[in-house]
Image: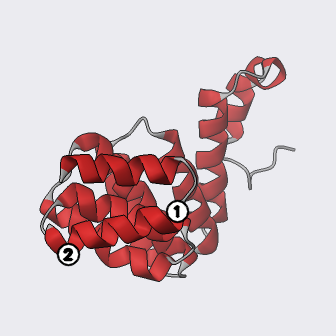
Amino acid sequence: MEKELERAIAIRKSGNHKESNELLMRLVLDFPDNASINYHCAWSFDLLGEESKAVPFYEKSIRLGLALNELEGALLGLGSTYRTLGEYEKSKETFQKGIESFPNNKAIQTFYAMTLYNLKEHSKAMELLLKCLIDTTSDGGIISYKKAIEFYSDKLDETWK
């Protein structure tokens, strides 16, 4: 089972997403309660642009219990998939769990900001994106304004006269 899963991942990494998905679907049938196989199967559907098929596999993988590194990816993948399907509240809830569990993951925070945008929570989305930007950038110009950007990040609607 482990060798077949590794082979499916290698096939995915080589860019043959359809073949990887087919192998993962066979593995899910043989090992339906394996969290890692369910996670990689979900991921494979996302890569094929079949997000609605990915959801039950993401949900099951999380329910079954994943290793932390896979849980991190599954929460990001599921939250993003919910967002692309227009299920914004589910996306928000998933990303909040992801941020709570992995507070330093800027990718989760960035995708969460997209969901906040979809929920018309524009100020909160911008604040989060600006904070992600100043925490991750290597751009000297942005770094030189880090304090100002951080200060204004939650005051975008305020004016000073």
The three-letter code of the residue at mark 2 reads Leu
* Image location (x, y in percent) of residue 59: 27, 71
In the rendering, which numbered label is found on residue 31?
A: none
At x 48% / y 54%, what residue is drawn?
A: 12
Residue 142 as seen in the image, left or right of residue 150 = right
> How many other residues sit within 10 Å of disc 1, few (<14), some (14-19) or many (≥20)?
many
At x 31% / y 41%, what residue is drawn?
A: 69
Q: Which residue is mark 1?
A: 17
Tell me which numbered mark, 2 or 1, is placed earlier along the sequence.
1
Q: Which residue is mark 2?
A: 29
Rendered position, 15 above or below 52: above
Viewport quadrant of the N terminus: bottom left
In this rendered view, identify the residue nearer to me: 51 or 133: 51
The three-letter code of the residue at mark 1 reads His
* Image location (x, y in percent) of residue 82: 46, 74
**Helix, strand or loop under label 1:** helix
Label tally: 2
At x 47% / y 65%, what residue is drawn?
A: 19
Rendered position, 84 above or below 153: below
Q: Coloured how?
A: secondary structure
**Helix, strand or loop under label 2:** helix
At x 20% / y 75%, what residue is drawn?
A: 29
> How many other residues sit within 10 Å of disc 2, few (<14), some (14-19) or many (≥20)?
few
Residue at the limit of the structure toward the right, as seen here: 161
User: Residue 33, located in which quarter of the rendered image?
Assistant: bottom left
Res 88 visible: no
Whether tag 2 and tag 1 are in contact, CB under 8 A, the answer is no
In this rendered view, identify the residue nearer to me: 72 or 41: 41
* Image location (x, y in percent) of residue 67: 21, 44
User: Residue 27, located in which quarter of the rendered image?
Assistant: bottom left
